[in-house]
Image: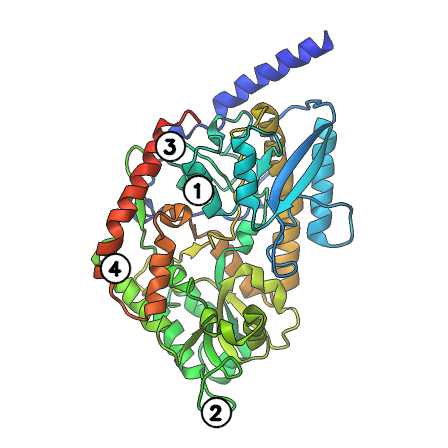
Amino acid sequence: MRKIFAIVFVSAMILILASSCGGGEGAEKKDGPEADVPGAADEGMPDKTEAKIEHEVPDIDFGEYVFTVLDREGYSGTYWVSVDMYAEAENGEPVNDAVFRRNRRIEEKFNIKIREIKKEADLLSFAQKSIMAGDDDFDVLYPYMQNAGAMIQKGQLLNLYEVPYLCFDKPWWNKVTNDSMTVAKKLYCAVGDIATITNDSTWAVLFNKEITKNLDLGDHYAMVNEGKWTIGVLHENSKKVTQDLNGDGVLSLEDQWGALNQHETAYCLFAASGQPIMQKDANDLPVLVLNNDRTAAVLTKVVEFMSDEFAQVKAEDHASKYGDIWAVMMDTFIENRALYAIWPLRAVPDMRSMEADFGILPLPKYDEAQDRYYSVMQYNNATVMCVPVSSKNPERTGAILEVWAAESVETLTRAYYEINLKSKHARDDESSAMLDLILSTRVVEQGLFFNWAGMQEFFMGFSQRKQMDFASQYEKAEPKWQTAIEKTIEQIVNSEN
């Protein structure tokens, strides 16, 4: 009788919660300048001034079920390794201990055991093979955004709006970011407090405060607050700093640089202008809107900066000379031989050994007339939460994940954001405020999320060719893009998931 009662009770709760959660039908349309930009105002980190909001998931006994998470192993030692899903035991490190305590609460609430499978280069192939075989190897997976885009187009992920218990209006989910990833009012992956790599992969600009002071380059924090931090300022300051330190007549990473970056920076600076690639129509379907005069104007400034070999240096251009180009780039900044480093926030903890003070800035605006700053994530490193279509029990998965996200607010998020990133690694109070700005202004661009017919490579190409030939490049790319977009829309609209 107890089992029968439990089944009836859980079924009733599923019906109640399903009626009040998920469901993209009720998504509000925004008016004003942000309405045309996908993901224009990510909710960022939770507002700790608000009263704590409790989840609505009841205690359910899942009979010691082993709940399995598939996530990333990382590469280059411990770089980009997932540390936000699982911890064996407490060890005094804030994030590790927060993960351990959060997971214990979840295990006790549901009478489950949490297990982790880590993959890196083969995560996508492992997941796809398992799903196509109808296996039940994992309950939830955290692929890179672009890998998730590939899986969506193959119908391998569940529509999260249809998964019971998941309530994407709750503050532990980044609602605006998640809304920006929907197609045809379906959501196949989500971000929120449940994981931190998405924050790590958010682009920012680190700047050397010592060089800034010595060369009288102005108060960068004031520039940001006054809306004057632009790509023009980035370019002009960079030209003032670059110099041949060893006198060999050749600029290399042993010299001093204005800015350190990589070919991918071309898209980051473009996204920082707020110029969209795609917009959504009234049916929540993506429409290509890149071909316009402002796009050409923004790209012109981006290419001018990224082709100026006396202002900046791109990692890929020197990779053949060094065994570990990223270690060399890090050393260049740490050793006071670069004014700016345009990198994801994952680089901030690696600055611990730097003696000179550095600060953190958002990506620069296109010009001062631009209404606000925009930040962007690294789509081939940011991870998203997905549930495979092979899931044998979506109700159980939804219940666990909703509590997992809710419990992360006061555990993982606080340890990662308030203790580690803002208190332990940031060097000043202004950087702390800049982090709030960066994480609250993220853009999720569907064109790069799905990377239709090489859209990311399209932007990187301008940096590699060092010329602004937008019209001719767009003319070649547009038919391929349109075909890929239409194919994705057709698959999603006609999918039962």
Q: Secondary structure at mark 4?
A: helix
Measure the alpha-carbon separation of dots 1 and 2: 47 Å
Q: Amino acid at mark 2?
A: Asp
The label number, if any, that marks residue 473 in the structure image:
4
Quarter containing the N terminus: top right
Point out the tag, 3 or 4, that comes first from the N-terminus: 4
Choose between 246 and 31: the one closer to the eye. 246
Can the viewer see residue 90? Answer: yes
Q: Mark yes or no: residue 31 visible.
A: no
Q: Residue 83 at what x, y percent from top left? A: 65, 50
Q: Which mark is residue 248?
A: 2
Q: In whole angstroms, how far apart are the C-alphas of marks 2 and 3?
A: 57 Å
Ranked by sequence position, the earlier of labels 3 and 1 is 1
- Label 1, label 4: how far apart the Cα atoms are: 24 Å
The residue under the point 61% across, 61% down is 76
CA gap, disc 3 and disc 4: 29 Å
Instruction: Tell me the number on the disc at residue 492.
Output: 3
| Dot 2 and dot 3 residues touching (CB under 8 Å) | no
Q: Nearer the viewer, mark 3 or mark 1?
A: 1
Q: Check disc 4: other Cα within 10 Å, few if <14, some if 14-19, many if 20+.
A: some
**SS category of the residue bearing label 3:** helix
On the image, numbered disc 1 is attached to which residue?
150
Name the residue located 32 percent from the left edge and 44 percent from the top edge.
Answer: 35
Name which residue type carries label 3: Ile
Instruction: Mark 1 or mark 2: name the one nearer the start of the chain.
Output: 1
